[in-house]
Image (cartoon, helix red, strand yellow):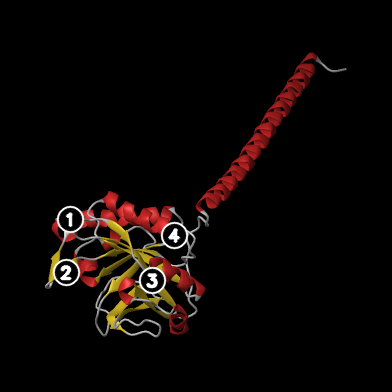
């Protein structure tokens, strides 16, 4: 027969077991709720992605293109190059960049390149991967964003596989920079902020941003190390060998090249270093 002390110990152990059991049930219930919450969150996220993709008409994942070679060769064109035979261009080139828009360097109005739609349509038919660019004369962050939105609006319905490019260069007359960009007295910080504003809008839309500029601009006019992460660097440097010492992806080697299918006297020639450190 158990003593009073033994009975007290037994009752104490029973209470502890019941308490542990109750805590375990609460813990399992909480764990179950967390799993349910996590599953619901995942489903919601997936539905959100699908909805955004459906609204935009394209994937929200940044588009890229891998060339099956270390150095890809291409051209960049605008209405100045006239009517282009894109089937012939595709026979000898790996890629192209097409000008879609411009901002005037005097009044600052933004307008569509008159051959943009033709060039995008026929480059796509010829199955040559292409990107697009806008000749910028932006002098504020808001104008740079406007240019990005302009590009996005006019490439809808086209299979743009390569970057959307902010073409940053000064207009020249008699060897001297002229126009609103040249006269704006912007700082390196201001110029970099404009470029990044353009690039962010492009990235948020699911495309890869790029910056086109001369070696002079990269070295003295902007902060390259502060550019938006993932921005493709395209350098204009008209020498036998590129003189730019920083990191770059594309080299525009000349603006006086020739290309089958392009009837204009000169065309820009570009080299994309796909396996560059």
Cα separation between marks 2 and 1: 19 Å
Q: Is residue 274 visible?
A: no
In the rendered view, tell whether residue 122 sits above or below residue 108.
Answer: below
> Please, what secondary structure does the residue beneath circle 2 have?
strand
Q: Are marks 3 and 2 in contact (CB under 8 Å)?
A: no
Q: Disc 2 vs disc 1: which is toward the camera?
A: 2
Q: Disc 4 vs disc 1: which is toward the camera?
A: 4
Circle 1 packing at 10 Å, graded few (<14), some (14-19), many (20+), is: few
First-in-chain label (3 vs 2): 3
Residue where numbered disc 1 is placed = 187
> Please, what secondary structure does the residue beneath circle 3 have?
strand
Q: Measured from the top left, where is residue 59 in percent x and y?
A: 53, 57
> Please, what secondary structure does the residue beneath circle 1 have?
loop
Residue where numbered disc 2 is placed = 172
Q: Measured from the top left, where is residue 110 in percent x and y?
A: 29, 57
Label number found at residue 207: 4
Residue where numbered disc 3 is placed = 97
Dividing the image into 4 quarters, which one contains the N terminus?
Answer: top right
Circle 4 packing at 10 Å, graded few (<14), some (14-19), many (20+), is: many
First-in-chain label (2 vs 4): 2
Horizontal relation, residue 174 to residue 258: left or right = left
Q: Measured from the top left, where is residue 152 in percent x and y?
A: 41, 57
Cα separation between marks 1 and 3: 29 Å
In the rendered view, tell whether residue 195 sits above or below residue 30.
Answer: below
Cα separation between marks 4 and 1: 28 Å
């Amino acid at each position: 027969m158990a003593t009073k002390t033994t009975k007290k110990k037994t009752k104490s152990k029973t209470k502890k077991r019941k308490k542990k059991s109750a805590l375990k049930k609460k813990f399992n219930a909480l764990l179950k709720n967390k799993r349910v919450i996590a599953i619901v969150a995942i489903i919601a996220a997936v539905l959100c992605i699908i909805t955004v993709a459906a609204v935009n008409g394209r994937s929200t994942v940044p588009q890229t293109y891998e060339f099956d070679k270390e150095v890809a060769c291409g051209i960049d064109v605008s209405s100045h190059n006239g009517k282009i035979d894109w089937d012939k261009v595709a026979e000898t080139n790996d890629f192209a960049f097409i000008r879609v828009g411009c901002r005037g360097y005097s009044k600052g109005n933004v307008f569509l390149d008159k051959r943009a739609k033709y060039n995008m349509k026929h480059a796509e038919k010829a199955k040559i991967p292409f990107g697009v660019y806008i000749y910028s004369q932006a002098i504020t962050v808001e104008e740079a964003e406007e240019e990005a939105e302009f590009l996005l609006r006019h490439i809808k319905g086209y299979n743009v596989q390569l970057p959307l490019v902010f073409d940053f260069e000064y207009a020249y007359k008699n060897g001297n920079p002229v126009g609103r960009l040249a006269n704006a007295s912007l700082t390196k910080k201001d110029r970099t902020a404009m470029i990044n504003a353009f690039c962010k809008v492009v990235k948020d839309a699911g495309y890869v941003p790029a910056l086109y500029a001369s070696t002079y601009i990269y070295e003295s006019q902007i902060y390259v190390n502060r550019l938006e992460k993932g921005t493709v660097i395209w350098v204009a440097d008209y020498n036998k060998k590129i003189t730019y010492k920083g990191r770059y992806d594309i080299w525009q080697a000349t603006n006086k090249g020739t290309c089958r299918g392009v009837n204009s006297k000169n065309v820009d020639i570009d080299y994309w270093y796909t396996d560059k450190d």
